[in-house]
Image (tube, rainbow, N blue to C red):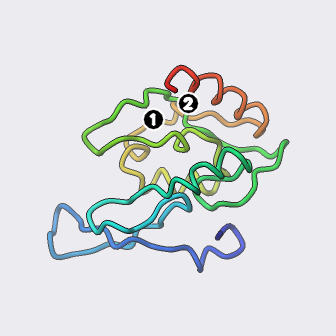
Amino acid sequence: MWGRKNFDKQPYWNHLEPVDKKSFIKVPLPWQSSPENPRAVVLIQEHEDRVYLENLCPFCGIELLPEERVVAWVNYDVAPTKEGARVFSDHHPFHIECMRQARAFCPHMKKTLDSEFKTDSFLNLRKEVDEQLRKYI
């Protein structure tokens, strides 16, 4: 796991920019993902499961504390888009600084409005997210 104290150990994915087919940019890789495929990030299902079971931030893999202020993407439309299928942990609470990174690089989140995100304690947001996502499982 990597996190706020060791962002220098964060894995990166060399993403091919659509504007220039010869250029790569370094994109921070979420903890629950793998750069296995050079054209797309691949979900690590074990990490995805641990996000929920151990109350971890999907981006850094560090535990979210019960009363910690966190942010969650509360647009629960989880249908696939042209960028590909979303993963459920996209809607799980994130550390605030981790969500800033995710919104800068995630193909889905970087196109979102500020109004699609909510900040609250981890316990409150986790309860809301779980209730909403049950509709899709």
Residue flagged by tag 2: what amino acid is it? Val
Horizontal side, residue 22 vs residue 126: left or right: left
Q: Position of residue 131 (x, y in %)?
A: 65, 22
Res. 74 mark: 2
Horizontal side, residue 101 vs residue 123: left or right: left
Instruction: Please tell me which residue lies in front, 30 or 8.
Output: 30
Q: Position of residue 111 (x, y in %)?
A: 37, 42
Position above or below: 4 against 47: below
| Mark closer to the observer (2, 1) | 2
Q: Earlier in the sequence, mark 2 or mark 1?
A: 2
Element under label 2?
loop
In three-dimensional space, the C-alpha distance between marks 2 and 1, rounded to whole angstroms, equals: 11 Å
Tell me the crowding category of disc 1: few under 14, some 14 to 19, or many 20 or more residues within 10 angstroms, Cα based.
few
In the rendered picture of this protein, how many numbered marks are placed on residues?
Answer: 2
Position above or below: 80 against 69: above
Residue flagged by tag 1: what amino acid is it? Leu
State the residue at coordinates (61%, 48%).
49
State the residue at coordinates (73%, 35%).
120
Q: Which quadrant of the figure has residue 24?
A: bottom left
Q: Which residue is tagged 1?
A: 113
Quadrant of the image containing the N terminus: bottom right
